[in-house]
Amino acid sequence: MNELIRLDNIGKSYGEHEVLSDISLSIKENEFVTLLGPSGCGKTTTLRIIGGFETPDIGKVIFDGKDITNVPPNQRHVNTVFQNYALFPHMTVQENIAFGLRVSGKSEQYIKDKIAYGLKLVNLDGYGNRRVDKMSGGQQQRVAMARAIVNEPRVLLLDEPLGALDLKLRQEMQYELVRLKKELGITFIFVTHDQEEALTMSDTVIVMNNGYIQQMGTPEEIYNEPENAFVADFIGDSNIVDAKMVDDKLVEIDGHVFKCIDGRDNGFNIGQPVDAVIRPEDIEIREHGEGIMNGKIISKLFIGVHYEMLVQSEDGKVEWLLQNYDSHEVGETIGMYVRPENIQIMHKPTSEDEEAQEVDI
């Protein structure tokens, strides 16, 4: 796929508050990209800069090889679906869909054909004459999608459009968005703070925090190979504990030595303090004394598919979060084992700048 959008060293401040700091990224044609992060991380500002609703203080926005940094929104080949949908409540569905086309001076036959196309694409055949204020949130979201799609944008910007929907409808719309992206063959840039949405729909996930990009990669890379503690903690559940490299590919965690796959080749030195990240589902439960370490289950919750347990280590210094399909009782003592490939070793922040990029949520 060819590069369609590139942000070069984008910076943006509001007064003395820096919202974006040296943001550089590349988005390919026909890619589904998600900007993911907590509130205030800069993801919506990034989207608005791509759409032309904000102008960066520094840096450039490149679209299909051309500098569009100062090009107004109506002259960019993008359309936006906002969180509140921004529909006209006094208009019917078809009037909302046709609005942008009429502003552009399209013929009535062209508009009629586009309305029919848009309604069919979002599964709203027969709803053209209904007022949007008489529709459910999910239906309104589909109308907003249709209104954007009929303008034939090369890029569709979606600013947390599923945030107001209930859980079941939100999950249904995730599949709908993936279907639309495949059928339309256009680039989707999606903003959310919901990790499940990002992992479910995206080709590429861009994790942001405090105005910085923390990591870019596929959903699998982001989840399985987080580059720092913030990403590991924000994407799913993680045990993040202080550790020390005691030899090449050997790490000491909670007083126990574990084999790992990171070592000198990855820039870790013997004796170096590090962060060790272990996902709860990667801790295997064994009989007491048969794992690398032992602990006692101090709480248990049933989470639909699996059990979530909190296990206190024998010395009482660390509480481990475990997820397992088998039920174990509170008070039970168990052994715990972790395979080397399931231990992610990370450098601790070495400067105030690094710490600023990895603040707690």
Image (tube, rainbow, N blue to C red):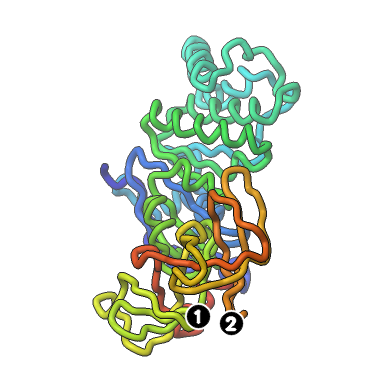
Q: Which kind of residue does numbered mark 1 sit on?
A: Asp
Q: Quadrant of the C terminus?
A: bottom right
Q: Give how far across and how far down residue 301 sits, in percent.
A: 67, 54
Task: Determine whether the residue tagged by mark 1 lies in a helix, strand or loop.
Answer: loop
304 over 62 or under it: above or below: above
Q: Which kind of residue does numbered mark 2 sit on?
A: Asp
Say if mark 1 contacts mark 2, CB within 8 Å. Answer: yes
**Direction from residue 275 to residue 1 in the image, left or right:** left
**Direction from residue 84 to residue 237 in the image, left or right:** left
**Direction from residue 141 to residue 50 in the image, left or right:** left
Which mark identifies residue 254? 1
Q: Give how far across and how far down residue 8 sits, in percent.
A: 37, 61
Mark 2 lies on residue: 315
290 over 192 or under it: above or below: below
Quarter occupied by residue 320: bottom right
Category of crowding for the residue at label 1, using alpha-carbon neighbours closer than 10 angstroms: few (below 14), some (14–19), many (at least 20): some
Q: Outermost residue, left direction?
A: 265
Alpha carbons under labels 1 and 2: distance apart: 9 Å
